[in-house]
Amino acid sequence: MKKIVFSSVRGNAGKTSLISGIISSKKDKKIAYAKPLGDRLIYKRKKSWDYDANVIVNLLGRKGELESRYEKITLGFDHAKLRYMYDDAGIKSALDEMIQEIGDGNDVMFFEGGRNLSFGTGLNLDPISLTKMVDGTLVVVVSGNREAVMDEIRFFNKYMHMEGCSFGGVIINKVHDIEDFENVCVPYIREMGVELLGLIPYKEQLTYFTLDFLAEKLFAKVLAGEDNLKNAVQNIIIGALSTTDPHRNPLFTRPSLNKPNQLMITGGDRSDMILAALDRDTAGIILTNDIMPPQNIISKVKECGIPLLLVTMDTFQAAKQIEDLDALLTPDNDEKLNLLSQLIEKYTTIDKIM
């Protein structure tokens, strides 16, 4: 069984999305997955889960089989607790058991590292140590502007101690100008002797939130539009204008505020803003301050099929929290998964190491 460890120099490079795309595109392969050190804690059925692991387990279609053995997919989250539970030999033994119980009978087993290359070093669960202990191949995912990507590859190639570690190569993700990068940067990467396994273009639709994702992250109550919670949010507008008729307000009618698939964030007492949103290209409405609008307003929103979410926080807090969210993949977002699968097939040579 081939074992591949995915890592990144820094966070949010797109490791989970790439793994999801590979799983979606390589239907002829039996693939197992583990994330030994969790870094995105969620609670599910009174258990501590890693968000990324939960996505992949659902995608593999082995939810029932793997949920009962979740501790074999992720050893834990708390570094101090794990240091108390395992010495170096214990970590190695736990990984061997993970491979046997989760990976046995599969063609490939993917291991996902934490948020960056140094994460987990004190536990010998950093990606390089992990690759050595499982006798795997390391793949590093990098993203960002051209200069940042080249800096990361040079830093990794120059300073990381790689003795005893099989390095498969790099996948460069979220590239805004493929042709420019190929002409300017790829020759230097090849001169460094680094294997380039993929050059994946930036796709804006992969950065969009869906309403069900926002509802989960904001602990929102869904008042209307349950059937359209898969609507994607492309633009956000704050409905806090002090006017009795938002339709006639010069600011509200600016072209910059009339972009497609908008998310309106406004107070539940702002019936004027809610009604104005119904006449626009609105993906969803978030009502703040835990204020319910009048029943006739809710009924009109239901007629339009627009998701209406109620949160306890105020408008500023809601907008700030959404701004700080990463557009994480969700297990049932078929549109994103199909796009990721196509990108893997067209722009990577991951088969070389699979």
Image (cartoon, rainbow, N blue to C red):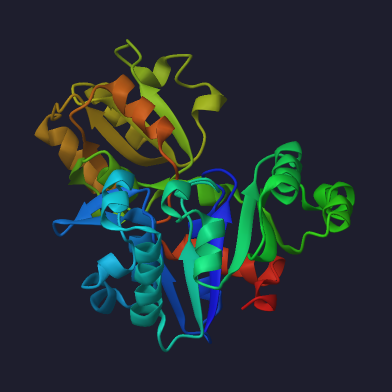
181, above or below 218, in the image:
below
Camera sees residue 143: yes
Residue plotted at (31% across, 28% down): 318
Residue ranking furthest to the top: 242
Q: Is residue 8 left or right of residue 64?
A: right
Name the residue nearer the viewer: 353 or 176.
353
> Residue 171: x percent and y percent?
67, 59
- Residue 179 drawn at (x, y percent): 83, 52
Foreground: 193 or 316? 193
Res. 5 image quadrant: bottom right
Q: In which quarter of the view is residue 25 placed? A: bottom right
Residue at 36% from the left image edge and 53% from the top image edge: 38
Tell how many labels.
0
Residue in the image at 42% along x and 89% along y: 105
Q: Is residue 116 above or below residue 62?
A: above
Q: Quadrant of the C terminus?
A: bottom right
Q: Is residue 345 left or right of residue 276?
A: right
Position of 298 with respect to 284 (left or right) is: left
Residue plotted at (50% across, 62% down): 130
Residue 284 falls left or right of residue 27: left
The image shows residue 106, relative to residue 230, as above or below, that is: below
- Is residue 21 at least partly visible in the picture? no
Q: Position of residue 213 (x, y in %)?
A: 33, 48
In this view, 203 is above or below 297: below
* Foreground residue among 20 and 209: 20
Residue 145 placement (x, y as % from top left): 70, 39
